[in-house]
């Protein structure tokens, strides 16, 4: 076997162990904090306490996976104000980076399938707004649950690509849901661009490595005075902001 073949074998062994290590560092803090996490989800009004522990969990994972994160902020969310946070979605680490980047308590709108992940899924389905994108009834229920959370003073986070695009796609088309919700509630949209997550830890099993993760929190986009007729233009404008920054990161 030549040196090149040895290197390939070593890479695949590293990727296998790296994925296993990810699930270990995901599970360990949850096991340690389980009683406190469980208590924090017993009442919806206690969600901010759960959110603080979720941020600690995220920092633990990023640090022990060897991901050094760096944030650039054009604007900082105000404490006690509701926002619609959106970002490109390329990695299993997007959830963690979003939780570390944003201090304002928010609720994820996410795929129902993630609720099947052992341990993580237990809390995920009790704290996030789950959506089955193949079901119109499920999509309608998302709006009702999101409205309830916004009225309680929380923010919402949606990955508007509606899933994880194939790896060759830089940024997929955005769904309209996040923008309709933001317009209905007249809350600002906060676009974030994650520059390195696909390279660091994509959904391809045999891939990934430690390194920096850059994120840009862009200037907020107001929805004051906008109507549902403005949804498409707001969608396109938000996507242009994120795509432009992605191209800058990749240069």
Image: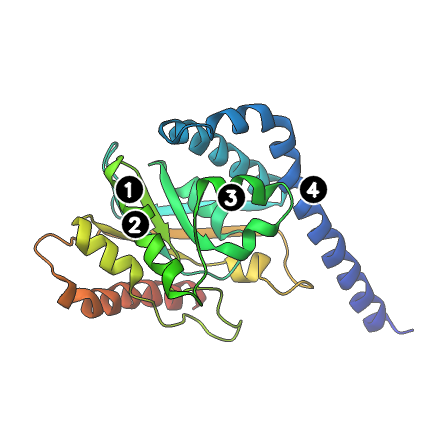
Write the residue at 60% across / 34% down.
30
Going by the image, does 98 lie left or right of 2? left
* Residue 150 can be seen, yes or no: yes
Write the residue at 32% across / 58% down.
140
Q: Residues within 10 Å of mark 1 (few under 14, many from 20)?
A: few
In the picture shown, does residue 35 fall above or below 189? above
Mark closer to the observer (3, 2): 2
Between 41 and 215, which is closer to the camera in this rendering? 41
Image quarter of residue 32 = top right
In the picture shown, does residue 25 fall above or below 17? above
Q: Which residue is mark 4?
A: 24
Label pair 2/1, CB-CB below 8 angstroms? yes
**Residue 34 image point, x, y percent:** 60, 28
Q: Earlier in the sequence, mark 1 or mark 4?
A: 4
Mark 4 element type: helix
Q: Which residue is mark 2?
A: 144
Name the outermost residue toward the right: 1
Mark 1 element type: helix
**Residue 130 image point, x, y percent:** 44, 52
Q: Residues within 10 Å of mark 2 (few under 14, many from 20)?
A: few
Res. 148 mark: 1
Image quarter of residue 78 = top left
Write the residue at 53% across / 39% down.
123
Q: Earlier in the sequence, mark 2 or mark 4?
A: 4
Between 96 and 139, which is closer to the camera in this rendering? 139
Q: Which residue is mark 3?
A: 124
């Amino acid at each position: 076997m030549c040196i090149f073949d040895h290197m390939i074998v070593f890479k695949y062994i590293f990727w296998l162990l790296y994925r296993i290590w990810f699930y270990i560092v995901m599970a360990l803090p949850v096991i340690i904090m389980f009683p406190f996490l469980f208590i924090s989800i017993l009442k919806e009004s206690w969600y901010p306490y759960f959110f603080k522990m979720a941020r600690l969990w995220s920092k633990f994972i990023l640090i022990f996976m060897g991901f050094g994160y760096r944030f650039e902020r054009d604007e900082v969310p105000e404490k006690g104000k509701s926002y619609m946070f959106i970002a490109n979605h390329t990695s299993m680490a997007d959830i963690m980076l979003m939780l570390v980047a944003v201090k304002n308590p928010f609720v994820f709108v996410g795929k129902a399938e993630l609720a099947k992940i052992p341990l993580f899924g237990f809390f995920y389905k009790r704290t996030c707004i789950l959506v089955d994108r193949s079901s119109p009834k499920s999509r309608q229920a998302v709006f009702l649950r999101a409205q309830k959370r916004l009225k309680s003073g929380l923010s919402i986070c949606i990955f508007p690509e509606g899933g994880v695009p194939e790896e060759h796609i830089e940024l997929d088309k955005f769904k309209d849901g996040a923008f309709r919700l933001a317009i209905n509630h007249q809350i600002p949209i906060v676009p974030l661009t994650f520059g390195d997550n696909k390279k660091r830890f994509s959904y391809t099993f045999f891939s990934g490595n430690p390194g920096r993760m850059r994120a840009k929190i862009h200037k907020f986009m107001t929805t004051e005075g906008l109507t549902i007729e403005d949804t498409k233009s707001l969608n396109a404008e938000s996507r242009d902001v994120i795509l432009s920054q992605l191209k800058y990161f990749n240069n």
